[in-house]
Image: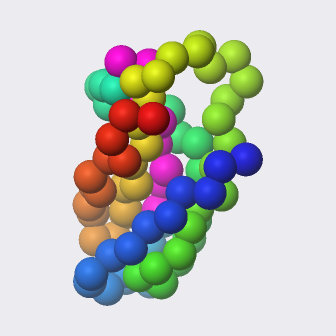
Amino acid sequence: MVNVPYTYGGTFNPGNILTAELSSSTGSFASPVSIGTLSTTSSVGSISAIIPAGTASGNGYRIRVVSSDPVGISNNNGTI
């Protein structure tokens, strides 16, 4: 399990869902994989995430957080 911390400078609306997304091994988010979700209005916290079994080895993976309400995409965490 991986904890994905987040901090948001605004206010999430009721019913907001945060999704942690994993990039490809090259760092591309063209087809991200959802690795965890959290229903919250809290502007600070962390999402419990699981890297899927069978994920190829690599050192270019990145993680980002996407919110549903308001819609938003975080910066990614850089290369991991």
- Image coordinates for residue 40, horizontal then vertical, percent: 52, 77
Q: Is residue 46 visible?
A: yes
Q: Residue at x 43, y 43 (%)?
A: 63
| Above or below, 55 relative to 3 | above
Q: Which residue lies at the image location 37% right of the left edge and 63% below the top edge?
A: 68
Q: Can residue 24 be seen in this snapshot? A: no
Residue at figure coordinates x 59%, y 14% from the top left: 56
Q: Residue 38: x and y, percent?
A: 58, 65
Residue 70 point in image, percent of width and height: 28, 71
Answer left or right for 31 relative to 38.
left
From the viewer's side, name the closer residue of 77 and 66: 77
Left or right, 60 with reference to 19: left
Asked if the magenta segment contains residue 39, the reply would be no
Q: Residue at x 65, y 49 (%)?
A: 2
Q: Nearer the viewer, residue 71 or 65?
A: 65
The mark tally for this picture is 0
Quadrant housing the C terminus = top left
Q: Which residues are magenta?
A: 18-26
Colouring of the image: rainbow
52 versus 5 height, above or below: above
Tell me where residue 22 appears, x and y as whole percent: 47, 36
Q: Nearer the viewer, residue 21 or 14?
A: 21
Give above or below for 36 relative to 15: above
For residue 43, above or below residue 80 = below
